[in-house]
Image (tube, grey):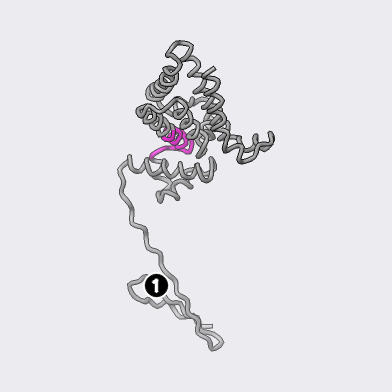
Amino acid sequence: MLIVPRLPLGSGGDSLVMALGDGDIKATTKTVSKKTKRVRRSPEEARELILSTAADRLATIGLSGLNISGVAEAAGMSHATVIHHFGSTTAMRQALLSHMTTELLSDVREALARQDSPEQVLAGLFQKLATNNHGRLAAWLTLEHQDVSISEAVDGHNEGVGVLFSGMIDAIAEKEGATDEARQKARLRVFLIATAAMGLGVCGSALASLIGLSDDDLTTFPRWLADTMQQAGGS
């Protein structure tokens, strides 16, 4: 068999390899990949892209999708670029938790500005914590990195978080007379909603199966919880 050297086909980056043998001529075309043009971003834009990509992977894949190499590839960045902005997988996950919680609290702020009912505000809080693996990420941080508190990961000074939760509690307590007792009940309601939502996000499906609840039951659980709390608040 005689191998004929590669023959350039022109500016398209293709080359032709011809193999002659047994009276047959076989030709194959190989395309040379071209380098993707580098996209220049500001540090803020790069961090935002990394975190939004990580959030998408958390929602669709889970915690296993939050690794530097996977996020870098999905974001169209190099491994070194993600390391430059976050330093480690753990730091990236902490930053993502902060990013997601900031969005949650922004929704709460908007709901309070619209003067939504306490039930609507709590329903929004529940929905955010129970979906997209937000609660699972917070639980992972608590269990795997007990040296880092959730408040530290969410907000270094914890001022924004504290102010917004205080605003939510005030709005709920105001409906009950704005007394000290009403504020304490409001705190407990927020605590119950948050822990129930995180529990649902972490192991809700497994628990439902053990208890005998269907997928439809899980879907209606938030509404049932809201109704139950409203009845308890009015009693």
**Residue at 41% from the left image edge and 37% from the top image edge:** 86
The residue located at (37%, 60%) in the rendering is 35
Q: Secondary structure at mark 1?
A: strand
Q: Nearer the viewer, residue 117 or 5?
A: 117
Taking the image as shown, residue 70 lies to the left or right of residue 49, namely right
Residue at far bottom of view: 23
Q: Badge 1: few (under 14), some or many (20 or more) residues near its Cα, within 10 Å? A: some
Look at the picture and state if 225 lies above or below 5. Answer: above
The three-letter code of the residue at mark 1 reads: Asp
Q: Residue at x 54, y 83 (%)?
A: 1
**Residue 107: percent from left, percent from top:** 40, 32
Relative placement, left or right, of 234 versus 164 is right
How would you classify the magenta stretch by its main secondary structure? helix
x, y (%) of residue 155? 41, 27
- The residue nearer to you, when weighing 227 against 142, is 227
Q: 48 above or below 126? A: below
Query: Mark 1 highlights which residue?
Result: 14
Image coordinates of residue 137 in percent, x first then y, are: 51, 35
Asked if residue 219 lies in the magenta stretch, the reply is no
Q: Nearer the viewer, residue 16 or 77?
A: 77
What segment is highlighted magenta in the picture? 85-100
Q: Is residue 167 left or right of residue 136?
A: left
Where's residue 90, x and y in %? 48, 35
Within the magenta stretch, is there residue 98?
yes
